[in-house]
Image (cartoon, rainbow, N blue to C red):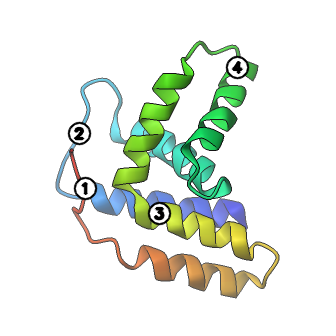
Amino acid sequence: MEIKVKQLIKESLYKRLVGHGEIDTILNNYALVEKWTTGIMALGYNDSDIELAAQDIYEMKAALLEKISIEDIRAFLCLVNNRFTDEIMAFTRYVELRDEDESEIISAVQEELNLVEEGDFMFS
């Protein structure tokens, strides 16, 4: 079920990027969507608590022997939290309902994502 929800969130992120082309000089849009999805999921699992979400990501990266500062993760999560509130709420709804019927979960997630408009990406 989580895989389906992640896919819906990724589709929503791509929908926001329509008409903007590649938005970063280092990471392509695919890599950005993957990275943003990780942040959205961490915030969704932690009820939008940036500190708890940052700890989760930090522990995951440390286990993979990646060097990154907790401060960089916090900054990234603040950006994700400000840009993608609809996607975070959608994933939070999944977390709240994950023991319910699949159709109920998908409906609740879609309801949150229906607020996203094509090309609605905020650069600041």
At label 4, the amino acid type is Ala
Mark 1 vs mark 2, foreground winner is 1
Please report whichever mark, 1 or 3, sits nearer to the chain's N-terminal start. Answer: 3
Taking the spot 66% from the left edge, 53% from the top edge, the residue there is 46
How many angstroms separate mark 1 from mark 4 (CA)?
A: 31 Å
At label 3, the amino acid type is Glu
Q: Are marks 4 and 2 in contact (CB under 8 Å)?
A: no
- Measured as percent of width and height from the top left, residue 71 is found at 49, 24
Question: Where is mark 4, residue-wise?
Answer: 62
Q: Are marks 1 and 2 in contact (CB under 8 Å)?
A: yes
CA neighbours of label 3 inside 10 A, class few (<14), some (14 to 19), many (20+): many
How many angstroms separate mark 1 from mark 3 (CA)?
A: 12 Å
Question: Where is mark 1, residue-wise?
Answer: 121
At label 2, the amino acid type is Ile
Question: Where is mark 3, residue-wise?
Answer: 87
- Measured as percent of width and height from the top left, residue 104 is found at 68, 87
The residue nearer to you, when weighing 120 against 72, is 72
